[in-house]
Image (cartoon, grey):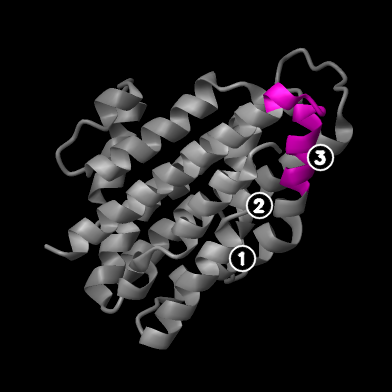
Amino acid sequence: MQNTQTFERVRDRLLQHPVYQELTSAERVRAFMEHHVFAVWDFMSLLKRLQRELTVTTVPWMPGNEAQYARFINEIVLGEETDEDGQGGYISHFDLYMQAMEEAGADTGPIRSFLNRLEQGGSIAQALEAPEIPASVRQFVETTLEIAIDGKPHQVAAAFFFGREDIIPDMFTHLVRELEEGGKPTDRLLYYLKRHIELDGDEHGPLAERLLAYLCAGDLRREQEALETAERCLESRIKLWDGVREQLAR
């Protein structure tokens, strides 16, 4: 990747964001979750776009060309949509997070209403217009969906790796430490966070990096576009966390 110094500075800003140290009460944790759940949801659009690019999802089925990367994507889909729930069953990570919100007493109304508007045929922009959805959430989801829908494959892979699989283990480790030291976690939230630290750090992150390298194919232009996309995603996450802080200050 070219010109990585700016990217590293943005990454450091995200990892040093003060929001992690400010989740000092149950009320503050609930506010964080009400924002963050939208990021849990929109991750799946990045993943599904990559599944469409790298696996065969058409009928009639035809043999694919990249079994190694198709396997990787299908494994992540399996985990994200039907992971072990820690209680002997299976659950999507989104539904697991919704359970954590309910356990913590967080308001699931905004995300449920948003999904209902989409299900009824509303556009992303229309579904995000509701007054209960903060501007920081709107910009985050719009950024993610624009990349997932219109981005080139290597840009989607950059958002997937740098914006999610690479940063999440470090980001969630900070969060888990602060929650546990403050005595404010919920069991389901901690299970969700620790599961992502384990999967993304040990398995998904290294594979996602290889996938990005494969899609860039050593092309300097693609590498630069991927890095620019990565910076954009991390800046968008910083704005999301800024929105949480604004909510906490009220």
Query: Is 147 rendered above or below residue 41?
Result: above
Name the amino acid, label 2: Gly
Q: Is residue 79 left or right of residue 132?
A: right
Query: Is 6 rendered above or below residue 87?
Result: above
Q: Residue drawn at (80%, 17%), measured in percent from left and top?
A: 61
Q: Secondary structure at mark 3?
A: helix
Distance Cα–Cα, label 2 vs label 1: 13 Å
For the record, the magenta segment spans: 207-222
Marks 2 and 1 close (CB-CB < 8 Å)? no
Query: Is 3 rendered above or below residue 98?
Result: above
211 drawn magenta: yes
Seen as rendered, the residue at the extreme left is 250
**Which image quarter: residue 114?**
top left
Q: Residue drawn at (44%, 69%), measured in percent from left and top?
A: 189
Distance Cα–Cα, label 3 vs label 1: 21 Å
Per the rendering, the mark at residue 25 is none
> Please, what is the dominant secondary structure of the magenta stretch?
helix
Distance Cα–Cα, label 3 vs label 2: 12 Å
Residue 31 position, x and y percent, is 26, 62
Residue 19 position, x and y percent, is 34, 66
Q: Nearer the viewer, mark 2 or mark 1?
A: 1
Q: What quarter of the picture does the N terminus occupy?
A: top right
Residue 154 position, x and y percent, is 67, 28
Q: Residue drawn at (44%, 83%), measured in percent from left and top?
A: 180
Pointer 3 or 1: first along the chain = 3
Q: Is residue 47 in view from this perspective?
A: no
Per the rendering, the mark at residue 79 is 2
71 drawn magenta: no
Q: Residue drawn at (60%, 46%), measured in percent from left and top?
A: 162
Name the amino acid, label 1: Ile
Q: Which residue is mark 3?
A: 71
Q: Which residue is mark 1?
A: 197
